[in-house]
Amino acid sequence: MNHTVILASGNKNKLRELNAMLAVFNCLCESQDHHNVPEVPEDGLSFVENALIKARNACRHTGLPSIADDSGLEVESLNGQPGIYSARYAGANATDTDNVTKLLYELGQKPDLNRSARFVCALVFMRHELDPVPEICVGTWQGYILDKPRGENGFGYDPVFCYGEDGKSAAELMPDEKNKVSHRAIAMTALAERLSTIDIFTT
């Protein structure tokens, strides 16, 4: 028997990744857009809070279990900015390029600043809207911010996020390489392990 789980997002890349992860549980992950789930204000103060808000909203409108993630970039010398505001760091309608440009500008004001950074992904699984113990997994990806963008792959801050000893930016990694080491991959692996130990469809 196949079960349906809602992804509290319209992101096709996330949907593909989650379907691969949930296949072993006989689950089919569907986008909330497929069920006409309205967007909900992400007014939490942490990645986990925002993921919970989105997951609960999807459960409320579909009556089905849901998975939500909230992700972003934290830069140590900027007190964790852009953090939960990563997607709108340069404004409400900012593009990826706008956000990267602002980030490099802020760091460029003080060249001696520590450029250490990490990507963070909080993944939440909720069985239903009133689930009192949702499954929560957090993955992080440590690196630092480059002086200028490099690479054509990825999205968001990938072109300026450097990972590993080879000095590649996240945007210089092939998708299959990134999917093995990224913050989302780490969180998804942890969630898959967690779900394998419980009956995820009990209420």
Image: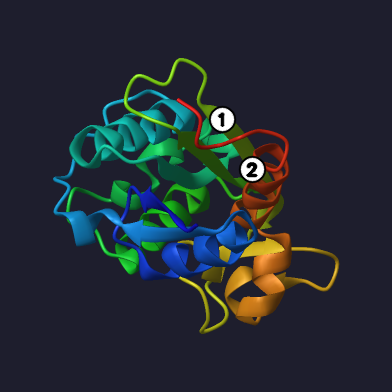
Residue that appears at 51% across and 64% down: 19
The image position of residue 62, as x and y in percent, is: 23, 42
Q: What quarter of the picture does the C terminus occupy?
A: top left
Residue that appears at 51% across and 84% down: 152
Q: Which mark is residue 135?
A: 1
Q: Amino acid at mark 2?
A: Leu
The image position of residue 153, as x and y in percent, is: 53, 81
The image position of residue 80, as x and y in percent, is: 53, 33
In primary-sequence order, the first of circles 2 and 1 is 1
Q: Is residue 18 above or below residue 41?
A: below
Q: Are marks 2 and 1 in contact (CB under 8 Å)?
A: yes
Q: Amino acid at mark 1?
A: Glu
The image position of residue 179, as x and y in percent, is: 65, 68
Residue that appears at 56% across and 30% down: 135
Q: How is the image coloured?
A: rainbow
Q: Is residue 131 above or below residue 15?
A: above
Residue that appears at 61% across and 35% down: 199
> For the residue labelled by badge 1, is the local secondary structure a helix, a strand or a loop?
strand
Q: Which mark is residue 64?
A: none
Q: Which mark is residue 191?
A: 2
Name the one closer to the observer, 118 or 16. 16
Name the one closer to the observer, 26 or 9. 26
The answer for how far apart the CA atoms under marks 2 and 1 are is 8 Å
Q: Residue furthest right?
A: 165
Q: Quadrant of residue 69?
A: top left
Residue 176: tell me if it is visible.
yes
Name the one closer to the observer, 121 or 165. 121
Q: Quadrant of residue 77?
A: top right
> For the residue labelled by badge 2, is the local secondary structure a helix, a strand or a loop?
helix
Q: Is residue 175 above or below residue 80?
A: below
Q: Is residue 111 left or right of residue 16?
A: right
